[in-house]
Amino acid sequence: QVQLVESGGGLVQPGGSLRLSCAASGNIVRVDNMDWYRQAPGKQRELVAAVTSGGDTNYADSVKGRFTISRDNAKNTVSLQMNSLKPEDTAVYYCNAVIKQLFRSPKGYWGQGTQVTVSS
């Protein structure tokens, strides 16, 4: 079994910062892409940031220059540093990872989600 466990959400004032973390555990042979998505009330889930196993990153236009994604391949973790937060960043943030287990094809897994609320 594979689990993704997120942490770090909370309430922050506009202009503030938060750091989200996600740890993958279980019978893992390899972790490929690791991503952060978010879903605001009444909206579709959207990709926020992505990082490959080689460290290449990609960001949604709305967060470029404010958010930074990073990963630790040795620990199978991914983090999202969020600075200059805006009310429109309020959403449930989800970690997603493509994981290869022994004798299985790579498969995408989701974390349980962590709430980020930006409000004064």
Image (cartoon, rainbow, N blue to C red):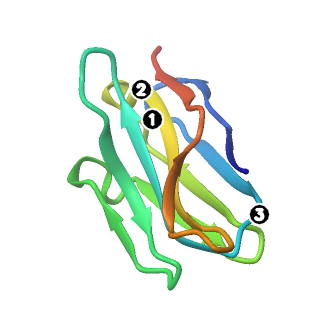
24 or 47: nearer the viewer? 24
Q: What residue is drawn where x is 46% and y is 23%?
A: 118
Look at the numbered disc 1 and give the secondary structure of its residue. loop
Q: Which mark is residue 27?
A: 3
How far across and how far down the image is residue 43, in percent? Answer: 24, 23
Look at the numbered disc 2 and give the secondary structure of its residue. strand
Going by the picture, which residue comes out furthest to the bottom? Answer: 54
Q: Is residue 3 left or right of residue 31?
A: right
Q: What residue is drawn where x is 41% and y is 63%?
A: 50
Frontmost of labels 2 and 1 is 2
Q: Amino acid at mark 3?
A: Asn
Q: Earlier in the sequence, mark 2 or mark 1?
A: 1
Give the quarter of the image for residue 111: top right
> Whole-Å distance between the Cαs marked 1 and 3?
39 Å
Going by the picture, which residue comes out furthest to the front? Answer: 103
Give the quarter of the image for residue 85: top left
Q: Which mark is residue 15?
A: 1
Q: Is residue 42 above or below residue 46?
A: above
Find out whether the residues at labels 1 and 3 contact each other: C-beta distance under 8 Å.
Answer: no
Frontmost of labels 2 and 3 is 3
| Mark 3 nearby-residue class (10 Å; few <14, some 14–19, many ≥20) | few
Q: What residue is drawn where x is 53% and y is 79%?
A: 53
Residue at the spot of label 2: 91
Q: What residue is drawn where x is 46% and y is 75%?
A: 52
Q: Amino acid at mark 2?
A: Ala
Q: Is residue 88 above or below residue 35?
A: above
How far across and how far down the image is residue 71, in percent? Answer: 61, 68
Q: Is residue 119 above or below residue 98?
A: above
| Mark 1 nearby-residue class (10 Å; few <14, some 14–19, many ≥20) | some
So how many labels did they put on this image? 3
Q: Earlier in the sequence, mark 1 or mark 3?
A: 1
How far across and how far down the image is residue 75, in percent? Answer: 77, 69
